[in-house]
Image (spheres, grey):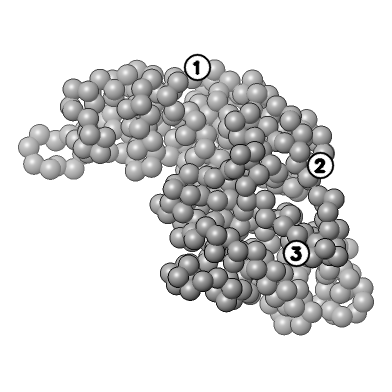
Amino acid sequence: MNAQGAGQQPGARSRQQSRLLALLRDEGPMSRVALGERLELPRAKLAGELSRLVDTGLVEIGGPAASRGGRRSTLVHLADDLRFVAADVGATSVNVAITDGRCEVLASQSEDCEVRMGPAPVLGLVVELAGRVLDKAPGRLVGAGIGLPGPVSFRDGMPVAPPIMPGWDRYPVRDELAGIWGCPVTVDNDVNVMALGERHAGVARSLDDLIFVKVGTGIGCGIVLGGRVYRGVAGTAGDIGHIRLDDYGPACACGEVGCLEAYFGGGALARDALTLARSGRSAMLAEALENGGRLTAQDVGEAAVAGDFAAANLVREGGRRLGHVVASLVSFLNPGMVVIGGGVSRLGHPLLAEVRSSVYRRSLPLATGNLPIVLSELGELAGVTGAAWSATDRAFATN
């Protein structure tokens, strides 16, 4: 991997330096005067902290700031050569990006990959893709973040008993990747990093309390409270895909029956679409099956938009069930926004309308009176953006 200076990890040496780095990441270049005011630091103290960060190569100073009267201040910004690897591992695909210190994606690449193949081939692909994208945007690798589609011990940097990830239980993902890349690595649940991505660069920008619901092959929920991801004691908070809706429902990948995911995950939609096609109840899905040899959630969405009644009914029923679960979350957590993302969210506004209808009908008016329920703004970049933000948070923390 072409990572200039990998292995030399400067990091912040004080709480003030950590706050300064985070401020430059979130707000962009700032004058010395503005930094001092925001951090409430006297000029001499700020100068000392900046000098140390310049020496470590994390910060650069250059260019005059806008005049506020008197002598012009200079702009302070994160070093241009800072690079972060951000990886979003899904059930059936891997997306890897390289970002700068402000979590702006500079280059990205994705490939189909079954997470069921196990950690060695999947992480091998992550490392390979990271090398490719870093070649497109070379710089100094100082941190990395990765999201995985299952319960994760954030503290230990490893998945714990993930239902759809055989062979991954307690695999030392963080330590293995840190050894390869020579930099700090954070490992989190994929929906948590998506929630972070939307909060810091998407439709939920700057909101401190929100719910991000991912509907893909699996279904999960990232919960942000007070500006921070709520993970629960063991890292399983937000695992709504395995909330049981029916004791006699379809079998789920987790080994139980009647889970939300078994009704409306990507696999469940493909299964029900196949039944409709083979039974003759959906001419459009039957045609899609004949042409493509298989059916996906995207086929269901296209048929529904084209006016196929059976496909549209699948979307309505799935959205209604998802809305029931989201309504309970809204009543319990009272968030400022609900964001729907993931591959199945490409079903678009018909799905969103069903979710909204269920939530507004079932939750208290006080909780929903000013509650936006919206589709993800970042789409496929939500995961890598959030993983990058998590990586910068770790890299800029006090050593």
Q: In the image, which is nearer the foreground, mark 1 or mark 3? A: 3
Relative to 374, say whether 253 is above or below.
above
Residue 314, percent from left and from top? 76, 73
Q: Position of residue 233 (x, y in %)?
A: 61, 39
Q: Which residue is mark 2?
A: 116
The answer to whether residue 318 is above or below residue 165 is: below
* Real-space CA distance between mark 3 and mark 2, rounded to the nearest whole angstrom: 26 Å
Q: Decide which of tag 3 and tag 2 comes sooner along the chain.
A: 2
Name the amino acid, label 3.
Leu
The residue lying at 34 percent from left, 43 percent from top is 27
Q: Tell me, yes or no, if residue 133 can be seen here.
A: no
Q: Can you see residue 24? A: yes
Residue 390 vs residue 53: left or right?
Answer: right
The mark that comes first in sequence, 2 or 1, is: 1
- With 206 as the anchor, is 183 left or right in this view? right
Q: Residue furthest right?
A: 279
Query: Real-space Cα distance between discs 1 and 3?
Result: 51 Å
Please state if 303 lies on the left or on the right of 360 as rendered. right
Numbered tag placed on residue 8 in the rendering: 1
Picture coordinates of residue 48, whole percent (x, y) = 25, 20
- Mark identifier at residue 245: 3
Callout 1, which amino acid?
Gln
Considering the numbered disc 2 on the image, is that residue within a helix, a strand or a loop?
A: helix
Coordinates of residue 24 in the picture (x, y in percent): 35, 37
